[in-house]
Every structure is written in C-alpha cells, then in structure tokens.
Image (tube, grey):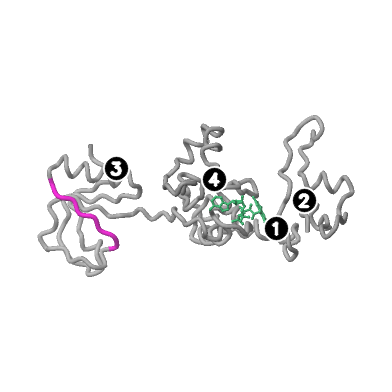
Amino acid sequence: STPIGARRDVSLASYCTLGVGGDARWLVSASTIEELADALAFAASKRVPAVVIGRGSNVLFADAGFDGVVIVNAIDTIERVGAGYAFNHLGAALSKEGWSGLEFAVGIPGTVGGAVFMNAGADGGDTATALVEVECVSPDGGRQDLDAEADAEEEEESESELAGWIVASATFRLRRDPRANDRAKAFLRRRARAQPLSERSVGCVFRNPPITAVNPDGLSAGALIDRAGLKGTRCGGAVVSEAHANFLL
Ligand SMILES: Cc1cc2nc3c(=O)[nH]c(=O)nc-3n(C[C@H](O)[C@H](O)[C@H](O)COP(=O)(O)OP(=O)(O)OC[C@H]3O[C@@H](n4cnc5c(N)ncnc54)[C@H](O)[C@@H]3O)c2cc1C
C-alpha cells in the first residue's frame, strides 16, 4: 500500500540547498523507522529505486527528476543516550528543544545509567515511563539490548535478570511539546524553593508512602518526618534538614 504522506510528482528543488532538479515520482517523509521501512517496501513493490536524503545539502538532482521514491529522513528524535551522560543536563537540553518526557530530570544530579537503575523520578514523572530500551553489559561482559516496555510487564523477572548488569545506554520515548521548557523551569524553581540544594545530600532519602490507614491523607515522607518534629535532629555528623525533612545532610 502507499505509505502515509507519500506524494506524487514532487519538485526536488525544494529538497536541496542548490534549489534545482526535476520531480521525484514519489516523495515520502519518514519520521519513524517503521515509516522508513514502509517507504522502502513501497519502492520494492513498485519496482522502482529508492534514495534517502537528509537536508539535501550535498546532492545535485537531475533536471529529469528521479523516477523512483525519494525518502526524506525526518527521524529527528534525540533518543539514545550514553549511560554516563548527566541526567539533569539531558532533561534541560531536551526540554529546551521542545521535547517532552524527561522534564522531571532537570533537578536530578545523577547519570542516565543511575536514573535507569534507580528509576529516578520527580514532579509526577519517572524514568521507567519514558524508557524504551536499555543497552546493557552483563556480569560476564556480554552485551544485550533489553526491551524496557516488555520488562516492565514482567517486572519480577526483569529485576533478577538485571542484577549485576551495567547500563551502557538508554533509549527514551519523547514527544514534541512546546511547553516542555516552561514545565522544566517550573520544576527547577520549585526545587530551589523547597530543597537545601547548597548542602551535601543524596536528595530525598525515603520514598513517599502510599495512602493507607496510617497515612489516610497520603502525606509525603518529608511531611510525616516534619510532623514527627524531627527537623534539625542530629545523629553524629548527620542532621535532618530544616528546609526539607526528607533530606538528611
Ligand atoms: C540534590 C539532590 C536531589 C535529588 N533529587 C532526586 C529526585 O528528585 N528524584 C530521584 O529519583 N532522585 C533524586 N536524587 C538522587 C539521585 O540523584 C538519583 O537517584 C540518581 O538517579 C542517581 O544517579 P547516579 O548516577 O548518581 O547513581 P549513583 O549514586 O552513582 O548510583 C546509584 C545506584 O545506581 C547504580 N548504577 C549507577 N550507574 C549505573 C549503571 N550505568 N548501570 C547499572 N547500575 C548503575 C549504582 O551501582 C548504585 O547502586 C537527588 C540527589 C541529590 C543530591
């Protein structure tokens, strides 16, 4: 079948920096790997050649055009990232570029690998939700790509499977959202107001407990510690932060 968005007899002049060239019999813009595969299969089914172009900044199309399928590579996602990359910088850079999915990461001062391992999260978002695939090195040095979505469904199995594995890179699912940067900035402002960021810590120590009979209002761990009157309590060199009771400094 004809790929979605395939157009017939399209002038190639608009698809190259030289601004010259005849028509492509078909032109397809592929924004996912599946669309790319569909476009190639379409060309094969029509028994015509296929050629892929990027921004056309180093091609010269013939005035006679191209009697086949020109595929414009529009896969412009920024997805796969090395595990040692700073998670907060990743969140900030992506949000600034209008990508949504990791805005919550802006205030988390770890690496991508640490975030995957810990399922780091904040402000209603978490790493697992945006994660698609993890490239791992096994304890015996083998390499494997793990499907994060399939593993989430078989969580218990994946936990034992992952023990001792090192995350080498991660692939995230992102979507375009012009408000991503505003959200990320608001998250940072909230942190700066609520957290003792100039002190040494590991962030919040306790996970927030669920709503139960003993915590019917679903209070956060910090609020519960505060209610218990523990802010400022010292033990050796450690102290419960006055600014945020879930921070041990
Ligand atoms: C000021 C402050 C604010 C914070 N706010 C948040 C927050 O909002 N939300 C949150 O979730 N956390 C928060 N944290 C905690 C911390 O930043 C996160 O847990 C982060 O994901 C840890 O990443 P890391 O790279 O520093 O991991 P590390 O601390 O170096 O390691 C943590 C664990 O992950 C494992 N690990 C690290 N890298 C890999 C890898 N490549 N493959 C496999 N395992 C690995 C380590 O072996 C270890 O068990 C905060 C910390 C600070 C200091």
Residue 108 screen position, x and y as percent: 63, 56
On screen, residue 105 versus residue 245, left or right, reads left
Mark 3 CB within 8 Å of ligand 1: no
At which x and y percent is residue 38?
26, 42
Please give the range of residues in magenta: 48-55
Circles 3, 4 touching at the beta carbon (< 8 Å):
no
Q: Quadrant of the C terminus?
A: bottom right
Determine which of the numbered discs, if any, sits on residue 246 in the image: 2
Residue in front for this viewpoint, 11 or 143? 143
Q: Which residue is mark 1?
A: 191
Label 3 or label 2, whichever lies nearer to me, is 2
User: Assess mark 1: CB under 8 A from ligand 1?
Assistant: yes
User: Mark 1 or mark 3: which comes first in sequence?
Assistant: 3
Q: CA distance from mark 3 to mark 4?
A: 44 Å
Q: Residue type at mark 2? A: Asn
**Disc 1 residue type (three-letter):** Arg
Name the residue carrying label 3. Answer: 4
Cβ atoms under marks 1 and 2 closer than 8 Å:
no
Q: Position of residue 102 (x, y in %)?
A: 55, 52
Q: Secondary structure at mark 3?
A: loop
Task: Return the x and y of residue 167 as percentages of the image width and height.
Answer: 50, 50
Is 70 left, or right, of 219 in this rendering?
Answer: left
Whole-angstrom CA distance, mark 1 to mark 3, is: 44 Å
Mark 2 packing: few (<14 Cα in 10 Å), some, or many (20+)? many
Residue at left 35%, top 53%? 75
Query: Badge 3 local density, few (<14 within 10 Å), some, or many (20+)?
Result: few
Q: Amino acid at mark 3?
A: Ile
- What residue sits right under mark 4 in the picture? 164
